[in-house]
Image (cartoon, rainbow, N blue to C red):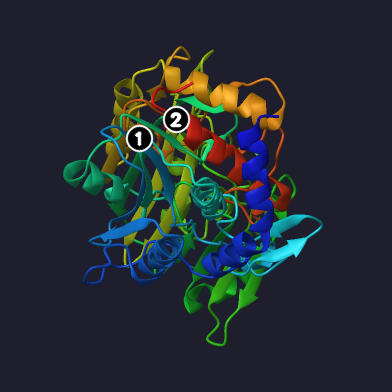
């Protein structure tokens, strides 16, 4: 073990309680994107979380600036070259509260883990980076290149924060993001987010399911107005039939005005790895497709199911594909609503790195245009594929082997991270091989020991990347 690593470990050890205390304060912010306010383009809570981190950085003696609410920067060092670390303070919604074993917006420590939304993605890793850099500073190290922690504010949605940064700020020559897996993620699938809508005769029926298109929906409700009260027995029969082979659970309630409400409870999962989840929207569509007493909804639900299918791989639509470099395509129906005669849904599609996005997107678009839908939104993110010969990757791999003591690995993921924001940028942690952190799911957690190990890892990486020439 090298002397620098021993010294950084000692510094981190002295700051462990402080790191956890500040993570506790940061997890409290419900920093999901919300309507814009003056100077707060992604809402009050996101802005408050950003300000908390910037204030913490200033207390450590770093230069920290809020750039019109879009992004925060924490700067340290000197020299012409800029090294970037891309993190974010925004989170995905907590989802169905009944699926959480602890309060999602409070830090709870159980058996060596801390639970709470953002502990693993990306508030915990952000603080590990900050404290790793702080440990270097306390040791008297002076970087020969400038370090900039770039703190995004809507990574989980449409990356307006990163577009702002690229338009107004200096682009780092090399960067990493602690928002993937160790050792290095150098391949990320292409990402497409789509929103479609259609006017239908809804008969007063309301559907509301999902919270974000990049999360498998764990809750969906079907509300039938009072005039359907006489169909309660038929609806119960349909629920029993669809429940036989379902991965979701259904409940049926009658309101005080005789409206019928069916709630479907599924299981959340990230859209980039939807297989462990159970999509509650699909569950409601299957129920609706079995109910002949609401003919319009039955027709629309059946049509959507034909295109989306039971498995989140695009097979039903004929867009399924895979490659050796990054694995199979995934497709997630993340949000659906029916209200005021308008049926709207949101899709998240992850496309293997060697397959052109355009050919799959055109198929999806043509399919729903044929079904009478209008495309309201389409956002595309090209895949990331960084050669493993890049000096940055080689440097990070050597740091990982030094700190963790295991052979470095390169990974492909379906997630769309900040690594694709700049050239010469990859993911470096913060999840270790085999770790299950429930990212984007209920009971998100981080191993306390790894928060501290990661601080040491990032401190070592920042030193090596800011020497007169990287290792």
Instruction: Classify mark 1: helix, strand or loop.
Output: loop
Say above or below: 176 vs 299: above
Q: What residue lies at 21% left-to-right and 71% top-to-bottom?
A: 38
Whether residue 129 is visible: yes
Count of all numbered marks drawn on residues in the image: 2
* Circles 2, 1 touching at the beta carbon (< 8 Å): yes
Q: Position of residue 23 (x, y in %)?
A: 58, 62
Label 2 crowding class (10 Å Cα cut-off): few <14, some 14-19, many 20+?
many
Q: Residue furthest front?
A: 140
Q: What residue lies at 34% left-to-right and 19% top-to-bottom?
A: 356
Q: Which residue is mark 1?
A: 145
Q: Quadrant of the N terminus?
A: top right
Q: Which residue is mark 2?
A: 465
Q: Position of residue 455 (x, y in %)?
A: 59, 46
Q: Which badge, 2 or 1, is on the more N-terminal residue?
A: 1
Q: Looking at this view, is 216 or 424 the one in front? A: 424
- Picture quadrant where residue 359 is located: top left
Q: Is residue 33 left or right of residue 328?
A: left
Q: Position of residue 202 (x, y in %)?
A: 37, 62
- Picture quadrant where residue 78 is located: top left
Q: Position of residue 316 (x, y in %)?
A: 50, 29
Q: Residue furthest right?
A: 111
Q: Residue furthest bottom?
A: 256
Q: Looking at this view, is 57 or 105 the one in front? A: 57
């Amino acid at each position: 073990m090298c002397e620098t690593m021993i010294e950084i470990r000692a510094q981190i050890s002295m700051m462990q309680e402080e790191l956890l205390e500040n993570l506790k304060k940061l997890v409290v912010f419900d920093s999901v994107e919300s309507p814009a306010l003056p100077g707060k383009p992604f809402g009050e809570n996101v802005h408050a979380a950003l300000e908390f981190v910037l204030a913490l950085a200033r207390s450590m003696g770093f230069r920290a600036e809020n750039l019109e609410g879009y992004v925060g920067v924490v700067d340290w060092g000197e020299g012409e070259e800029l090294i970037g670390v891309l993190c974010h303070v925004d989170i995905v919604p907590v989802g169905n509260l009944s699926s959480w074993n602890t309060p999602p917006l409070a830090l709870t420590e159980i058996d060596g883990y801390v639970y709470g939304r953002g502990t693993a993605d990306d508030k915990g890793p952000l603080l590990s980076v900050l404290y790793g850099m702080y440990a270097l500073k306390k040791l008297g190290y002076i970087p020969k290149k400038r370090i900039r922690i770039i703190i995004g504010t809507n990574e989980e949605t449409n990356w307006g924060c990163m577009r702002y940064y690229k338009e107004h700020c200096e682009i780092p020559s090399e960067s990493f993001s602690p928002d993937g897996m160790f050792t290095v993620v150098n391949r990320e699938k292409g990402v497409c987010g789509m929103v479609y809508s259609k006017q239908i005769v809804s008969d007063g029926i309301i559907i509301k399911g999902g919270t974000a298109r990049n999360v498998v929906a764990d809750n969906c409700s079907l509300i039938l107005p009072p005039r359907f009260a006489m169909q309660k027995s038929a609806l119960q029969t349909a629920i029993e039939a669809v429940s036989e082979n379902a991965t979701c659970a259904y409940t049926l309630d009658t309101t005080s005005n005789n409206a019928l409400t069916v709630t479907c409870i599924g299981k959340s999962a990230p859209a980039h790895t939807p297989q462990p989840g159970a999509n509650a929207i699909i569950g409601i569509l299957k129920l609706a497709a079995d109910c002949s007493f609401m003919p319009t909804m039955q027709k629309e639900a059946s049509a959507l199911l034909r295109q989306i299918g039971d498995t989140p791989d695009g097979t039903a639509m004929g867009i399924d594909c895979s490659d050796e470099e990054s694995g199979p395509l995934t497709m997630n129906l993340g949000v659906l609503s029916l209200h005021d005669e308008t049926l709207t849904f949101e899709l998240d599609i992850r496309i293997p790195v060697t397959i052109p996005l355009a050919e799959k997107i055109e198929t999806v678009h043509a399919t729903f245009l044929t079904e009478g839908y209008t495309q309201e939104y389409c956002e595309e993110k090209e895949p990331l594929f960084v050669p493993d010969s890049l000096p940055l990757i080689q440097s990070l791999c050597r740091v990982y082997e030094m700190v963790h003591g295991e052979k470095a690995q390169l990974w492909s993921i379906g997630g769309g991270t900040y690594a694709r924001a700049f050239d010469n940028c990859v993911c470096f942690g913060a999840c270790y091989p085999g770790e299950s952190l429930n990212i984007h799911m209920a009971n998100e957690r981080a191993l306390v020991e790894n928060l501290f190990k990661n601080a040491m890892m990032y401190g070592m990486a920042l030193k090596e990347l800011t020497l007169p020439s990287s290792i």
